[in-house]
Image: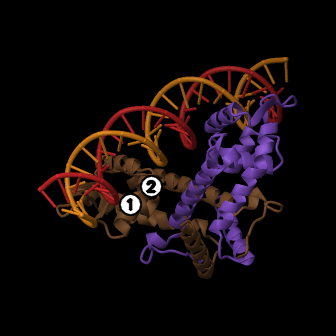
Chain colours: A purple, B brown, C red, D orange
Amino acid sequence: MTNIYDVETYEPSESIGYLMTRVKVEMLAALDRELAADDHLSALGVTSAQFVVMVRLVGTGNRKSASDLCKELSYDAGAMTRMIDRLEKKGLVRRMRCVKDRRLIYLEATEAGCAAYPRMLEISVAVQNRFLRGMEPDDARRLRDYLARMLHNAG
Amino acid sequence: MTNIYDVETYEPSESIGYLMTRVKVEMLAALDRELAADDHLSALGVTSAQFVVMVRLVGTGNRKSASDLCKELSYDAGAMTRMIDRLEKKGLVRRMRCVKDRRLIYLEATEAGCAAYPRMLEISVAVQNRFLRGMEPDDARRLRDYLARMLHNAG
DNA sequence: CACATATATCTGCCTAGGCTGATATTGTAG
DNA sequence: CTACAATATCAGCCTAGGCAGATATATGTG
């Protein structure tokens, strides 16, 4: 069991936690800028947080419940209710009460939501590619595996 | 110029942006849990956000301005003012107006702040080690380099 | 010096996430 | 069937970050 850091040699500026937090902030800020700059999407007034939910909802099979999204995104349930209120108000998603389990509400992208999705996907891909500039596919795979392992270690 | 992702094969669940956002959330949640569980630190009622600022302030040379911290942490200046209000109220930091440039206010950990620091450092190191469990030092270095490169690509 | 510009901090306003408890529904143990 | 625990959503309250504007100070230009 090898520990990576110890208190004697720990350098906050180079720590993985610090770097990751900053990269995440910068990546979401870049998403917000791209959204504001895009001719079609800017009209929707979609924030990066809403954007992430939409990409995730449509990109991984549509028709999932709010609690599914909460688990997948480590997101609060109360916040998700209001998040969906906003997306519904913008006409991007629809709530559909499940008939088999009436506690559940399935979410579904509307026609407008589906129409906006391809462009959202483009932006998401472009921003991530920009942040990964200079890396080879092998690097990206390794990075992804490291992150997946960390998420697993989170328990 | 190799692009890592393209819209045809992009998998949201395995994307680096998605994984990184989740790992970051889980890491801060772990910090909050550890803080609440610690006998000494729980009394201070320090949140993970305040914790990060303290580790950064004391761990990288003390005596820096609020705007320095904002840049280092990609943090809003208005939010930082209130963050420091809270830390000052808890007796962990002190504001000191700079005499050479009277716009600046230097921040300095108080005796109580310095006393709490070693334990904060321990927790920070322990949480990160836990998330990096199973990795070799070479892996951690690579991961750190990847993140640093991404931060650089953010521009 | 006068003036414009840049920087650091602070304040007010708005938005949004986290937490707690309420309600409805489902699953389970006896 | 009844009682109790678990789950999904929702609503209210609190906290905290982002943004715009105000103030004070510093810097650069003529």
Q: Quadrant of the N terminus of chain B?
A: bottom right
Q: Please determine whether, in this image, residue B42 is positioned above or below residue A92.
A: below
* B93 lies above or below B141: above
Single out the residue that lies furthest toward the bottom. B138
Residue shown at 75%/51% (left/top)?
Answer: A119
Q: Residue B69's mark? A: 1
Q: Position of residue B45 (x, y in %)?
A: 40, 47
Instruction: Spot the residue most to the right.
Output: A100
Q: Position of residue A144 (x, y in %)?
A: 70, 68
User: Circle 1 — which element?
Assistant: helix
Q: Secondary structure at mark 2?
A: loop
Task: Name the residue type under label 2.
Answer: Tyr
Q: Are marks 2 and 1 in contact (CB under 8 Å)?
A: yes
Chain letter of the residue beneath label 1 in the structure image: B
Instruction: Say above or below: B86 vs B138.
Output: above
Is residue B146 among what the camera can see? Answer: yes
- How far apart marks 2 and 1 lie (CA) works out to 8 Å
Residue under label 2, please give it: B75
Disc 2 is attached to a residue of which chain? B
Residue A102 appears in which quarter of the rendering? top right
